[in-house]
Image (cartoon, rainbow, N blue to C red):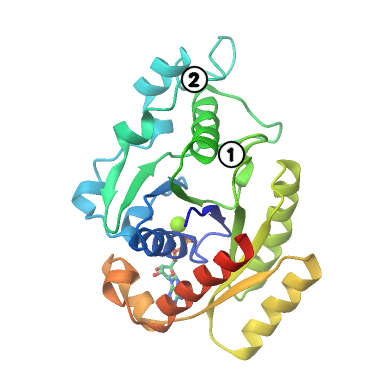
Amino acid sequence: MKVKIAVCGKGGVGKTTVSGTLARLLGREGTKVLAVDADPNHTLFLSLGIPPEVAEKIVPLTENDELVQERTGMEAGRSFGGMFKLNPRVDDLAAKFGVPAPDNVTLLVAGTVQIGGSGCMCPAGALLKALIRHLIVGSGEAFVMDMEAGIENLGRGTTRGMDALVIVVEPGYGAITTVGRIQKLARDIGVDRVLAVANKVTSEQDRKTIEAALAERGVPLLGVIPFDKEIHEAGLLGKAPLDHAPDSLAMRAVQEFLGELRVILG
Ligand SMILES: Nc1ncnc2c1ncn2[C@@H]1O[C@H](COP(=O)(O)OP(=O)(O)O)[C@@H](O)[C@H]1O
Ligand SMILES: [Mg+2]
């Protein structure tokens, strides 16, 4: 199954847990999966089960100044006063910089760029946008991207071919209000399908509160993942939840969520 999704939400809600687990579950079915880390605090390696000693050597593409300069023709830090290519070559980056993970998954740490209010355009940003556009549209593989809440990096035109933007929500005012902001950004950049998964749910009241808030905004809730001590423990130990607690309630809930995704995406 070739699911192409981006996962976003407020910090700490469980984006990395959900996206890494989804990537591996998809990979287990035999699909080649590209897991893209586009969070400035890149920790997707953890939930994929890539050892820290391998991960610490990874340089995010947008922080690889030499690469940015080589591909765009301009130094990374300079956003004004120089010309650079808006459409740099990116088709070889996944093969060159991808790191193998378990279950048929490849991790690509794309990194991110800080985007100012006016929508800054800089060489690293041009490389990132071109890369995302290429990976979503051009790759025949499944694609799961772990992002921060500021999804501006997607940019108009990069999302064509993406199946859905998945917002992870936890019980809490902050995470719930973030949904509205992400929804607006999604509209601005032309993402049609936005859906949600609730995580760290501890009670029926949690679930109902999230459900009501999402219903108000017209965002479908496709999965409910309980707060799970075993996942918390995996987080403390720096282990992939799927390796540490494969049969936990939370991991089963992610599997169910994938089933729902499959239904809605046809
Ligand atoms: N369902 C859950 N139950 C318990 N702890 C969880 C659950 N989901 C995530 N966590 C823990 O919450 C912390 C943040 O999760 P993470 O996936 O890194 O969030 P994000 O990527 O959104 O910042 C981690 O320590 C993780 O182990
Ligand atoms: Mg994260």
Q: Where, by quadrant of the figure, is residue 153 drawn?
A: top right
Give coordinates of residue 266: x percent, y percent. 61, 61
Q: Is residue 61 above or below residue 147?
A: above
The secondary structure type at the circle numbered 2 is: loop
Per the model, the C-alpha gap separating discs 1 and 2 is 16 Å
Ligand 2 is found in the corner quadrant, namely: bottom left
Q: Is residue 182 above or below residue 79?
A: below
For the point 45% across and 73% down, the residue is: 255
**Residue on which disc 2 sits:** 88
Q: Is residue 82 above or below residue 127?
A: above
Give coordinates of residue 48: x percent, y percent. 33, 58
- Considering every residue shown, the one lying at the far left of the view is 53
Residue 260 is at least partly visible in this image: yes
Q: In the drawing, what numbered circle is on residue 80?
A: none
> Does 205 sit left or right of 47 as displayed?
right
Quick check: is the Cβ at mark 1 less than 8 Å away from ligand 2?
no
| Residue type, mark 2 in image | Pro
Of labels 1 and 2, earlier in sequence is 2
> Does 230 sit left or right of 263 as displayed?
left
The secondary structure type at the circle numbered 1 is: helix
For the point 61% across and 60% down, the residue is: 265
Q: In the drawing, what numbered circle is on residue 153?
A: 1
Give coordinates of residue 188: x percent, y percent. 75, 42
Residue 169 is at least partly visible in this image: no
Foreground: disc 1 or disc 2: 2
- Considering every residue shown, the one lying at the far bottom of the view is 204
Give coordinates of residue 184: x percent, y percent. 75, 51
| Residue type, mark 1 in image | Asn
For the point 47% across and 72% down, the residue is: 254
Q: Nearer the viewer, residue 55 or 108?
A: 108
